[in-house]
Image (spheres, helix red, strand yellow):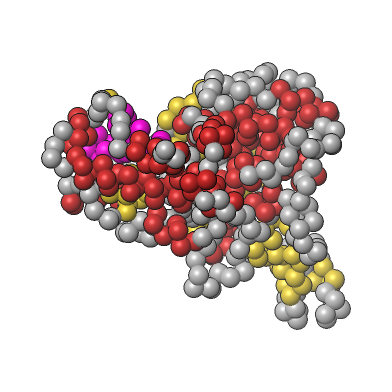
Amino acid sequence: MLSEEARLEINLDRGLSPQVFGCPHVKQLLASASKDIAIRSYKQACRVAFQLRHRDHDISAFEVRRCRTCCDLLTSTFLCLQCPFVGCRRLRHGEAHHSDSGHMFGVDSRTAHMYCFVCRDYIFNHLLENIRINTERLVIKRAALNKNGVKKDAITKEDAALVEMNAKMPPCRAQSGLRGFQNMGATCFMSVILQSFIHNPIIRNDFLCGGHNSKTCTRENCLSCCIDEIFTEFFSSPSTTGFGPANLLTTAWKTQKSLAGYSEQDAHEFLQFVVDQLHRTSDRQALSQQSDYCGCIVHRTFCGQLQSDIICPNCNNVTVTVDPLMDLSLELRDRKSANASRILSLQECLEKFTSPERLETKYNCSFCSTRQEVTKQLKIKRLPLVLSIQLKRFEHSLKSNKIDDHVPFPVEIDMTPYTTRERSKKRYTYELLGVVCHQGKINTGHYTCSMKNREGLWFNFDDAMVTLSSEKQVLASRAYLLFYIVKDLATSDSITPSNGY
């Protein structure tokens, strides 16, 4: 009598009729003399893709995913069906291989879905899908047996049913987390910040890996529980309609009285509130005894260090102070320049922020015991994994005013010149992850945002409406908040958060 595993092996060679939707090229392949070779290669690629899921702690296993051109292994890659080449999707090295070799098909190294480079789309084929599903079940079964030390032929029918029941993957749409939020009464400021968390791979992976267990949490008005509910809903439900975060809204009202009601709020202030509450309700605040380290997910994601140098002109003594850095707030104009009304670019804003400044008030120097007009300079001592930047568009002096001009900002930025290691040969490169925009006047308006997903595609979020965007459209937007992440982490599915670098 055949075992369950043997039946799965046999099922790999079976399938429904080779129907295909939208791609004539795979239909031609399966009708040609190369059909058996193609199916055999596809089975092998499926095994490689699914076996990697059960070897998360073996770094060598992920070498199979590494792009042969740019050596990128964090983003999605395609295993060529017709040769050993592996090409990434983000920089289109898989497409470049297709252009050079004429090989038309690639297998996604994460999901084992077939991709056609000619049609530039994933392929649905009954025969291939049956092979993919049966291969996944077989790999999961073998992994479970090896983990428990059970012989392969000793599995019972009950075990087989249990494995099959628990091995089902969520729908494709649910895995992406691509979904909007319902506006529950001037809550657009909340929606854009929540989207920045959902598309932040470090925060996303922490919550999806059980970083906060809402089922065992006993805190009242716990914001971490509300965020955990949103991640669960976005990455498990097949629904694509706008989600109404009612629990988070009521919890925010109870926790922060200024948020109660339906008046418009500032997105940056709400970001600071959420970060503070996630820190307060974290289960992992004390991972280290170091005074400047916190184990909560927001500190591991956003926290860096800002160094302030006070330089005495009399004795050149430097007094150094180091403070935590959760975000940067940058002035958009250089008031002391000849053209004080000119809007600075992001790089110019950072240069102004880190340039030496002569203080008007006098300072008592502890080294030479004199009172001097000192110079102050700010530099970033430790960069976070995700750099949060506020562009100060709202001015409050004699009259409140909003700066509505476009501030140029890049897709990639080298943060080395703005750090205490500005002369270092090592470069600290960040890439754009998200942009929050404000439309309207200073006291009334609307927030939208653009976020990059794990495949490197840009999407615009306008409450419940989600539309595909482009890099050109994102760079042309009038940003209010910017989120930059360490390069190559933006589209990663496997990140262990650290405390900056």
Residue 499, image x and y in percent? 66, 59
Residue depicted at x 59% and y 51%: 148
Residue 229 in view, yes or no: yes
Q: Is residue 227 above or below residue 295?
A: above
Residue 376, image x and y in percent? 71, 65
**Is residue 349 shown left or right of residue 285?**
left
Q: Is residue 78 above or below residue 2?
A: below
Residue 131 sits inside the magenta stretch: yes
Quarter residue 481 falls in: top right
Q: Nearer the viewer, residue 53 or 212?
A: 53
Q: Is residue 278 above or below residue 285?
A: above
Residue 444 in view, yes or no: no
Query: What's the magenta region?
Result: 112-134
Residue depicted at x 54% and y 22%: 239
Residue 269 sits inside the magenta stretch: no
Q: Residue furthest top?
A: 185
Residue depicted at x 67% and y 43%: 210
Q: Nearer the viewer, residue 1 or 470?
A: 1
Q: Is residue 288 above or below residue 146?
A: below
